[in-house]
Amino acid sequence: MTYRVVLCGCGAMAKGWLKAFANAPALKDSVTVVGLVDLDRSAADTLSREFDLCGVAIGTDLDAMLSETKPDILFDIVVPKARRTVVATGLAHGCHVLSEKPMAASLDEARELRKLADKAGRLHAVVQNRRYIAGVRRIRRLIEEGALGRLTGLHCDFFLGPHFGGFREQMDNVLLLDMAIHTFDAARFISRKDALAVYCQEYNPPGSWYRHGAAANAIFELSDDVVFTYRGSWCAEGSPTSWESAWRITGTMGTLLWDGSDRFEANVVAGTDGFFRQITPISVPVPENEADTHGHASVIERFLAAIRAGNRPETDGSDNIKSLAMVFGAIDSARRAKRIIIAA
C-alpha cells in the first residue's frame, strides 16, 4: 500500500525527512507526498523544487490542505510551540501523525494529544531517531544478553558548541528541551527502565551564545535501582563529544564504554581474587536487526509497519511521553532546586 502524506513545516528539519525518503527505496514505494504546508509559502515552494516534488499541493493553511488532499498521514515538522495545534488538526482529519521531537511543548499538551489520538483511533508517534542507530542497538543487545551482569548505572557526557542561529538561541531550557531528550530516551531504551525521580542543575555558562539554559547536570533515579547521570553543554568549545554523547554503562560484572561513534570498549570480571579483580575484554554484539540502524528512515519505516499491522511503534506517544516527562522533570527540578518525582 502507498500512503498519501502531507508534510507540515518546510524548514531545515524537513530536509532530513525528505532525504530519508531519497535514501531508502522502500519508503519511495510506500509514501507519496501530496501536499506541503508552511506559514511561509516560499519555504514550501523552495522545498518542492529542491526535492523535485512537482505537482504537489502547496499552501499555508493546514486544515484546508488536509480537506483538499485527504492524506493518510501527516508529517509534523513544526516548531514545538505549534505542535499541539498541528497534531490535533491532523488527528481530527483522520490522519496518523508522525511528529518531530519534542512530542509537545508541555506534559499537559502531551497528555491531551495521547487522548486525542486514542479517541481518533490513530497513531501519534515521534521521530526519536537516535534510537535507530547501530551503537544504541548494540548496547541494548549487550545488556539484554546479561554480559555486564545486573545493570547498575548509565553515565553520559554531551559537550558540543554548535552555532545554530535562529529560534534555538532564543529558547528557554534549550539544551534540555531541544537536545537532551535524545540522550534521555536512549537511556530508557537501552536500559528498559523508567525514570522515577530527578535532581537537575541547569545554567547558562559565561560566553554562551544562547539566551537560556545551554548547560545542565542531572541525576535520574530509574526503576530497579539503576542510576542515570547526564552532564551536557551546547556551548562547550574545543573538545567535542559525539552528538550521541559519550557513555559509561556499569553492571555488576563489568563496564562498557562507548564514544557515541564507532569505538566500543567492554570488560568484565574474570577473577575472584586481588584488590582489583582481573578483567577480560568482551565483544559488543552487532544489532539484532540491521534495518533498525538507519535513523529517520528506520523510524518512518517502523511507523508505516505499525499502521499496516494495527499496533504501536516503538516511538509511539504512549512510550515517548515517558521520555518527555524526564525533560520536564529536569526543568522543574532546576527551577525549584529540588528532587522531583517524575510522572508521565
Image (spheres, rainbow, N blue to C red):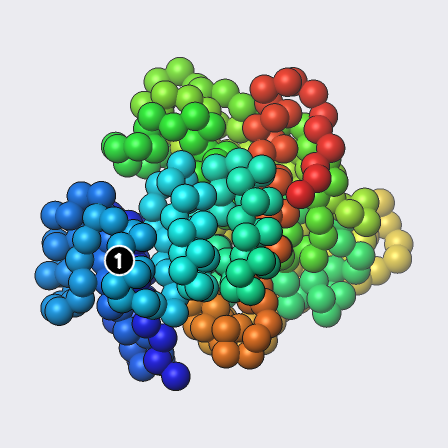
Instruction: Please state, as top left, top right, bottom left or bottom right, where the C terminus lies in the image.
Output: top right
Give the quarter of the image for residue 343. Answer: top right
Q: Residue furthest top?
A: 206
The percent position of residue 195, horizontal first and vertical second, equals: 70, 43
At 32% from the left and 36% from the top, the residue drawn is 162
At 41% from the left and 44% from the top, the residue drawn is 85
The percent position of residue 145, horizontal first and vertical second, equals: 72, 69
The percent position of residue 253, horizontal first and vertical second, equals: 79, 57
Picture mark count: 1
At 31% from the left and 52% from the top, the residue drawn is 63
Residue 147 seen from this side = yes
Which residue was labeled with disc 1? 65
Depth check: give the residue in front, 56 or 48: 56
**281 in relation to 82, above or below:** below
Instruction: Please state, as top left, top right, bottom left or bottom right, where the N terminus lies in the image.
Output: bottom left
Report the side of 93 relative to 336 (left or right).
left
Report the side of 192 relative to 136 (left or right).
right
Query: Dot 1 lies on which element?
Result: helix
**283 in relation to 243, above or below:** below
Q: Residue furthest right?
A: 273
Q: Amino acid at mark 1?
A: Met
Depth check: give the residue in front, 98 or 165: 98
The percent position of residue 217, horizontal first and vertical second, equals: 58, 29
At 72% from the left and 52% from the top, the residue drawn is 193
Depth check: give the residue in front, 124 or 258: 124
